[in-house]
Image: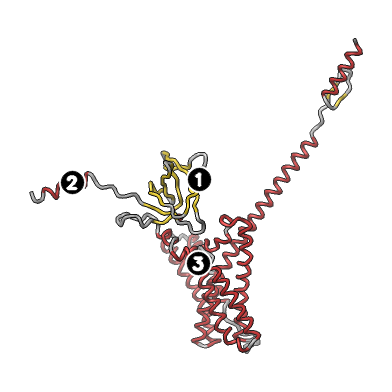
Amino acid sequence: MKTFYPLLLFLLCALFPNPLPAQIFRIDPLFTDSVKVARVVKAESGWEEYKPYTTINLPAAYEFDLIKKEGGYLIFEKDRVNYRIHQTEVIFSEKNPDEVVNPLPENVIRRHSALSHFFAGLTPYMIILLLIVCGTLIGLLGQRNNTLRSLALKALPVCLAAASALELVAFLTLGSDMIWWCDDDLQGFWGALLSAIPFTIAILMQYYSIRLYNDLLFNHEKDEYGNEKKISLKPVAWGIGLLFPLIILFVLLFRMIGLRGEVLEIGSALLGLGISLFLILKGCKNNIQTFGRQKGILISVFSIIYLLGLIIAGVMLVMVIVSIIVQILITIAAVVGAFYLLSKQSSESSSSPQPTFYAKDGSRHLYSSQAEARNRQIDSKKE
């Protein structure tokens, strides 16, 4: 009897399990204050968009119970109508009990971290711009004033390294979305175009500032070969810039010779990293020979951080410019196409033959009313 009641309780729990509570999600957009969700209906093959296509906007912090997760979308109900929202727009609500499992992938969870929200605002980019401007101004003043030169030699690399580090962290956090303020989907065409102007100026200043720092370090001093001394940046820049192209190249080469699987992936990555590391170490060696061990290592670390930030910002700028150019070309093509169709219709209408109407006596008239009037005159004369 002692084991009867526990066994009975176990069987009852197995037969009538307590349903787990629904998973609760909260809308958490990074760049807007609302999210557009599409209406869906249940079909044999799964959930399909409602016809005609229907959407509504839901505000940030709106919470809903999950019906089903299908692919990258979450299905939920609102006012007896089903909608779907992409998983990148939501977070797992803290209202969920501890036993409820979060089905969102790790990259989506990281996307909604406090750091992501920080870089989804203008503050970090204003800090980057301020650092670049301040560093450039201090460097220019240091060139013209020997008293400020020692300050510029310390402040300029610190400002550039801090700005580049923020650019690197922004990219690692948001990826290409780090330039959301130049996204035409969020800002519109003119908003993206106007935002691209200060972005371009900041990158040009960032590029010019390293040359300014080089002049402060050497003051146009020449080496034994008569060349101006400079920080060894080119090997480091090539090492960073060629990393991913080299990996892609080795993947293609390995595929051509029949390699597949982990050998292809690991081999391509190791070869690409090896060549990039060789170039970066070559730049570090040159800096150590120029500045000495301690200062050479510090300047090499600075140059790696600086170039990472500059290359990332430069690639992002190219993406923005290409997007703007594509939109301009599409607009021009649409205008030219519309003008061509209108001119074609106009020429067709002007070249179409004018109808001619004949009266009973064979006379020709431009309008049917004129021919009818002439017929009446002929009939009256006969009478």
Residue 32 location (% of width, % of height) = 51, 56
Query: Where 13 falls versus 104 (above or below)?
Result: above
The quadrant of the picture occupied by the C terminus is top right
Query: Where 287 falls versus 201 (above or below)?
Result: below
Most extreme residue toward the left is 1
Is residue 44 left or right of 355 when viewed as pictured?
left
Query: Where 301 falls versus 70 (above or below)?
Result: below
Between the residue at mark 2 and the residue at mark 3, the CA separation in whole angstroms equals 54 Å
Q: Helix or strand or loop: what does disc 1 sit on?
A: strand
The local crowd at label 3, few if under 14, some if 14 to 19, many if 20 or more residues have their Cα within 10 Å, is many
Amino acid type shown at disc 2 = Leu
Amino acid type shown at disc 1 = Thr
Between the residue at mark 3 and the residue at mark 1, the CA separation in whole angstroms equals 32 Å
Q: Helix or strand or loop: what does disc 2 sit on?
A: helix
Nearer the observer: mark 3 or 1; the answer is 1
Residue 33 location (% of width, % of height) = 50, 56
Image-quadrant location for residue 306? bottom right
Most extreme residue toward the right is 381
What residue is pinned by disc 2?
Answer: 11
Q: Earlier in the sequence, mark 1 or mark 2?
A: 2
What residue is pinned by disc 1?
Answer: 55
What residue is pinned by disc 3?
Answer: 170
Between the residue at mark 1 and the residue at mark 2, the CA separation in whole angstroms equals 47 Å
Q: Helix or strand or loop: what does disc 3 sit on?
A: helix
Residue 280 location (% of width, % of height) = 51, 76
Is residue 180 left or right of 369 when viewed as pictured?
left
